[in-house]
Amino acid sequence: MTHGLEPTEEYDGSIAVHLLDDQSGREEIRCGSYEEAIDVVKANHRSVTVAKIVDRGGDVVFTSAEMTIDDWETEWERAKRRLSVDVEAYDCPHDNVACFADDLCLDCQIDRVKEQY
């Protein structure tokens, strides 16, 4: 028996690529970055019915049924560039691409709290 509060959800911080095929079913591949997820989709999208990229929050951000991966990659790079212009430069020590000075990742938030004590 455990004492105290149990976590209500788990989060591994990775991006997932879902490969859906009418014949073989569904495969999920975990990726550490959008660049890695894009490479996985590029390598597999022709051999499956649909390829999807699911972000860290569980939202589908790309599906091959609606757009080509090359077009999505171009739009993603543009959005990333716009963010880099508008956001203070911050180098995450945990290599989290979604970590910014004004919106820290969970690991950096924990580090900041540890530094206060």
Image (tube, rainbow, N blue to C red):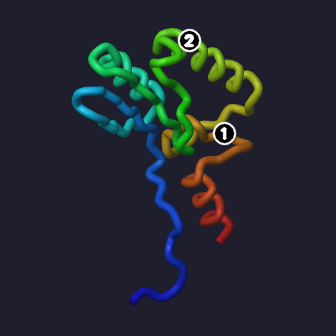
Q: Amino acid at mark 2?
A: Thr
Q: Secondary structure at mark 1?
A: loop
Label 1 close to label 2 by CB (< 8 Å): no
Instruction: Check disc 1 and report the residue beneath it.
Output: 100
Quadrant (top left, top right, bottom left, bottom right) of the N terminus: bottom left
| Residue at numbered disc 2 | 74
> Residue 2, percent across and down?
43, 86
Q: Nearer the viewer, residue 78 or 49?
A: 49
Residue 16 spot, x, y in % from top left: 42, 37
Which of the two residues, 8 or 105, is positioned nearer the viewer here? 8
Q: Nearer the viewer, residue 53 or 14?
A: 53
Give the residue at x 70% y 26%. 83
Left or right relative to 108: residue 7 = left
Determine the residue positioned at 65% across, 20% down.
79
Residue, x 44% and y 25% (percent of image)? Answer: 35
The x and y percentages for residue 81 are 65, 19
Disc nearest the viewer among 1 and 2: 2
The picture places residue 104, in percent across and down from the top left corner, at 65, 47
Report the side of 56 relative to 52 (left or right): right
Where, quadrant-wise, is the C terminus in this rendering?
bottom right
Amino acid carrying label 1: it is: Phe
The quadrant holding residue 80 is top right
The answer for how far apart the CA atoms under marks 1 and 2 are is: 21 Å
